[in-house]
Image: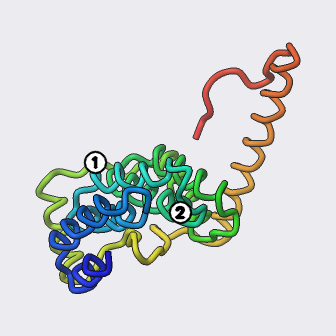
Amino acid sequence: LRAGNRAYADGRHADALERYGRAAGRRPKDARPLYNAGAAFYRLERHDDASAAWGEVAGRGDAARAVRAGALYNLGGARYRAGDYRGAAAAYRAALALDPSDLDARRNLAVALKRLRQPPPPRSDDKKKDDQDQDKKQGGEDRPKPDKPRPQDSLTKDEAEQVMRAVAEREKAAQKDAARRAQGGRSRHPGKEDW
């Protein structure tokens, strides 16, 4: 695990991934090698593999709560990057269920929900390539890193608070409807949510 972490820190992500695989084989009950493999997959731009690794860590009951919360946070980032804003929002919600004090997860949930309401316009492959080249020239990406959480997009504090209040109100209404249905009543808000 330490050798994998050194390789990761040196930017040798493929080597780190191999070492994490060996560590996972030696210590199958330790979630850290799989968690770190997710980060290496992410750096190698293998977002589906990163999502699978972090999803598996999040589902492990034997993993520490903080590790599962971190895996869910990172899963949200990988899904967001892949354009799965609904999946990203679900992962951030699950991360907040484990760690309600995670302000970055709250902010990223608000961003993912905003993207669901206002998806970015589709871009051609040439435009994506130009944007990626421009990102490299400017020295980085505009999305969170799995090993160093940061907000994904620009959203004012007031906008984020407004979105979070709306989410909380919807969740309260859904809980009331579920309780009413459990008692044999009808839901006041049939249909799907309008995000």
Residue 114 in the image: state x and y as whole percent. Answer: 53, 53
Left or right: 36 with respect to 169?
left
Q: Secondary structure at mark 1?
A: loop
Q: Residue at x 82, y 20 (%)?
A: 182
Looking at the image, is 192 positioned above or below residue 135?
Answer: above
Residue at the spot of label 1: 122
Which numbered tag is attached to residue 107? none
Label 2 sits on a secondary structure element that is helix
Local crowd size for mark 1, using a 10 Å CA cut-off: few (<14), some (14–19), many (≥20): few
Is 48 rendered above or below residue 107? above
Locate residue 179, reporting x and y percent.
84, 27
Residue under the point 45% across and 67% down: 152
Across and down, in percent, residue 30 comes to 43, 62
Q: Is residue 130 left or right of residue 105?
A: left
Circle 2: residue type: Asn
Quadrant in the picture for the C terminus: top right
Would residue 32 appear left or right of 106 to someone viewing this image?
left
Q: Quadrant of residue 159?
A: bottom right
Residue 120, above or below 191: below
Q: Give the mark nearer the N terminus: 2 vs 1.
A: 2
The residue labelled by disc 2 is: 108
Residue at the extreme left = 126
Tell me which residue sits at (20%, 81%) in the image.
11
- Coordinates of residue 103 in the picture (x, y in percent): 63, 71
Q: Nearer the viewer, residue 107 or 147?
A: 147
